[in-house]
Image (cartoon, helix red, strand yellow):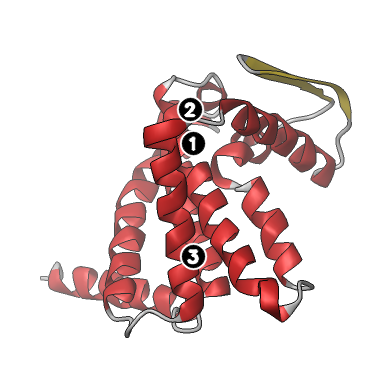
Amino acid sequence: MKLFKFILGLLLIPLSLLLAGAFVHSLVLLQAPQRTEIFFLAGVVAYLLLHVLLYRPVFMHIMAHEFTHAVWTLIFGGKVSEFHVTGKGGNVKVSRTNFLITLAPYFFPLYTVVILLQCLIIKKEFYDYAVFFVGFTLSFHVILTIHSILQKQSDFNESGALFSYAFVSFVNILVIAGIFAAVSPQFKFLAFLKDAHSILGGLVGANKF
């Protein structure tokens, strides 16, 4: 299993770069920003400025991190017996685990998902503000996830560092693209995947003898 994950990790590295390139390419092709896209980007920038200039909500990140472990444990039919969070760290005891449960906090933006669900029922006049917080919380997730990874999290050792880093990078690109597609009237997730497929096909074709 470890060998399989190592090989899969090696494959995911170029695929992640491919997805990132396709995502950027799809963004470049967008026309003038629409209202919801502007609110989304404003949220992204607002959190970035907050993080750099004023305050880093580490406790909120730790809370989301441990709660995500718990949620994904329940999804896979496990049980949570202990949940503890402080400003310096947290701990959750679960009855079962797998690599998705272990790595979920690094690719599943909990707060963003909660706000997206609220977007389904929120009144139209408040929708743009909800989209702002979609961008805000997604930026929060990305920046603090990078911060956590740089602290050499033990979660990455269970499935192997190479596989964990590659898998988290790959899934995060898909998640970010999916979330942006959910709030953007222009960006289409399937078109993004087709673009990635076309780029891959071009690279494969270019290397044929």
Amino acid at circle 1 = Thr
Q: Is residue 16 left or right of residue 177?
A: left
> Does dot 2 land on a helix, a strand or a loop?
helix
Q: Is residue 57 above or below residue 34?
A: above
Please name the residue shown 30% across and 52% down the image. Answer: 14
Q: Amino acid at mark 3?
A: Phe
In the rendered picture of this protein, how many numbered marks are placed on residues? Answer: 3
Q: Quadrant of residue 201?
A: bottom left
* Residue at disc 1, secondary structure: helix
Question: As rendered, which of 123 and 21 lies closer to the eye?
Answer: 123
Residue density around tag 3, few if under 14, some if 14–19, many if 20 or more, within 10 Å: many
- Does residue 8 show up? no
| Picture coordinates of residue 134, whole percent (x, y) | 58, 59
| Residue at horizontal 68 percent and vertical 19 percent from the top | 90
Q: Which residue is mark 1?
A: 145
Q: Element at badge 3?
A: helix
The residue carrying pointer 2 sits among few (fewer than 14), some (14 to 19) or many (20 or more) residues within 10 Å by Cα, namely some
Any part of residue 60 in sight: yes
Labels 3 and 1 touching (C-beta < 8 A): no
Foreground mark, 3 or 1?
3
- Image coords of residue 193 (percent x, y): 43, 73
- Tell me the kind of residue under disc 2: Ser
Identify the disc placed on residue 113. Answer: none
Q: Which residue is mark 3?
A: 40
